[in-house]
């Protein structure tokens, strides 16, 4: 990668599963040269159940733009190779439990002595301190702890639901990439690296910042719901479901016009979002009855952007969606084992110094020889390391 805002920034990726790998792919999206360092058995995400034969679909999606090397960091020789990599690197990212880096001898306090310009980013489950610091932290576990599962479902225990798609992992990855970028900016001014840490716990609370507000003297059990108006939601139509959002008076009036319910728009009983919420039980049946006259797609075409809405679709539709294609959000990759596949290209656009094409998600150890050669390791030395299981 020779262009992009993070061109010439070299990142060592020691992460596995979702949050760390996704954070490092976001850095690759910005032009960074990311080297994924995996243990001999590979990133655990590679072996997760998948409908892609021989690879994990999730791994492909969140490891774009990287080169890959296999190093046994538990061996002295493997650790020495990592330290050689750090001599030419700007950023190290790991998502071990807090006690693991020190046990491997690669914690920030140890590394900063030799590499004072290094940006060291840790993504934890619960953070570096506190009674849960060494507990295994996973997305769904933190969703349950933080109240997300309760809000996603209903107030009763039987209805609690997990939000699919690992939103905490994804948001923690974004926080990590943001923190690393800010630390690089500060290093440009001061010359010094620093330790950057975020966690799934922090991501869970940050994602709920609009709920995580407790006014002095409020009772514990107070309504913290974030859906004003209650008209906003998914409703059935003649064919298919449609999501409609009509919080503002303008959108509410437009919706009533399209639904041929002008009396609702004119009524002072419903002329604020709060009133529409208060009287939702009498409004929603009228809205739903009107929606039954057309299909979801027909309503979207008729409303033509004058009411925030969308037919409820499936992700498969996104690969050829005209808006996605126009924004070039999906790219076609060539994989060493799988052949061609389509996946996310990059989610951020730059008007100048845009990064070039991204690499496909790497196979296990795909670039080991190339990376070691760049470090000055000879072919005979690589062969000897491979014979002893240090690299592969």
Image (cartoon, grey):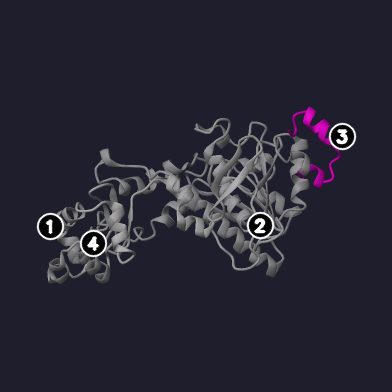
N-terminal of the pair, mark 1 or mark 2, is 1
Magenta-drawn segment: 371-392
Q: Calculate the distance from the C-alpha at mark 3 to the C-alpha at mark 4.
A: 70 Å
| Magenta stretch contains residue 372 | yes
The vertical placement of 275 against 120, above or below, is below
Instruction: Identify the residue under disc 3.
Output: 380
Q: Circle 3 sits in a helix, a strand or a loop, which is it?
A: helix
Seen at 52% across and 49% down, the residue is: 129
Residue 119 at x, y = what percent? 66, 56
Seen at 85% across and 37% down, the residue is: 379
CB-based contact (under 8 Å), mark 3 and mark 4: no
Q: Report the front residue among 109 and 210.
A: 210
Residue 42 at x, y = what percent? 63, 34
N-terminal of the pair, mark 4 or mark 1, is 4
Residue 356 has which mark? Answer: 2
N-terminal of the pair, mark 3 or mark 2, is 2
- Quadrant position of the C terminus in the picture: top right
N-terminal of the pair, mark 2 or mark 4, is 4
The vertical placement of 186 against 206, above or below, is below
Instruction: Identify the residue under disc 1.
Output: 282
Q: Is residue 37 visible?
A: yes
CB-based contact (under 8 Å), mark 3 and mark 2: no
Q: Report the front residue among 137 and 57.
A: 57
* In-image side of 361 versus 369 (left or right): left
Q: Report the front residue among 6 and 208.
A: 6
Residue 242 at x, y = what percent? 29, 52
CB-based contact (under 8 Å), mark 2 and mark 4: no
The vertical placement of 275 against 298, above or below, is below
Instruction: Identify the residue under disc 4.
Output: 229
């Amino acid at each position: 990668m020779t262009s992009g805002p993070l061109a010439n920034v070299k990142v060592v990726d020691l992460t596995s599963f979702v949050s760390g790998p996704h954070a490092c792919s976001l850095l690759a999206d910005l032009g960074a040269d990311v080297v994924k360092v995996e243990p001999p058995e590979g990133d655990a995400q590679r072996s997760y159940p998948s409908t892609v034969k021989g690879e994990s679909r999730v791994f492909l999606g969140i490891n774009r733009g990287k080169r890959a090397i296999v190093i046994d960091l538990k061996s002295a020789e493997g650790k020495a190779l990592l330290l050689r990599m750090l001599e030419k690197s700007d950023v190290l990212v790991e998502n071990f439990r807090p006690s693991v880096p020190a046990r491997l001898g690669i914690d920030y306090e140890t590394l900063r002595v030799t590499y004072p310009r290094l940006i060291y980013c840790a993504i934890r489950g619960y953070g570096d301190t506190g009674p849960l610091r060494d507990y295994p932290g996973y997305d769904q576990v933190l969703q349950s702890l933080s109240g997300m599962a309760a809000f996603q479902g209903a107030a009763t225990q039987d209805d609690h639901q997990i939000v699919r798609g690992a939103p905490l992992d994804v948001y923690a990855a974004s926080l990590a990439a943001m923190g690393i970028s800010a630390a690089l900016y500060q290093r440009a001014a001061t010359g010094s690296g620093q330790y950057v840490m975020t966690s799934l716990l922090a991501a869970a609370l940050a994602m709920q910042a609009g709920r995580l507000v407790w006014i002095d003297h409020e009772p514990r059990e107070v309504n913290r719901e974030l859906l004003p108006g209650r008209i906003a939601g998914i409703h059935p139509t003649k064919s298919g479901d449609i999501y409609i959002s009509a919080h503002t008076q303008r959108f509410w009036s437009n919706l009533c016009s399209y639904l041929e319910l002008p009396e609702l728009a004119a009524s002072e009983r419903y002329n604020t979002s709060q009133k529409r919420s208060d009287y939702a039980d009498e409004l929603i049946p009228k809205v739903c009855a009107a929606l039954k006259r057309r299909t979801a797609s027909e309503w979207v075409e008729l409303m033509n952007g004058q009411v925030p809405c969308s037919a409820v679709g499936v992700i498969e539709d996104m690969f050829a969606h005209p808006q996605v294609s126009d924004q070039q959000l999906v790219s076609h990759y060539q994989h060493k084992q799988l052949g061609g596949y389509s996946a996310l290209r990059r989610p951020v656009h730059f008007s100048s110094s845009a990064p070039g094409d991204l690499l496909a998600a790497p196979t296990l150890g795909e670039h080991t020889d190339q990376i070691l050669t760049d470090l000055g390791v000879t072919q005979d030395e690589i062969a000897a390391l491979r014979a002893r299981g240090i690299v592969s």
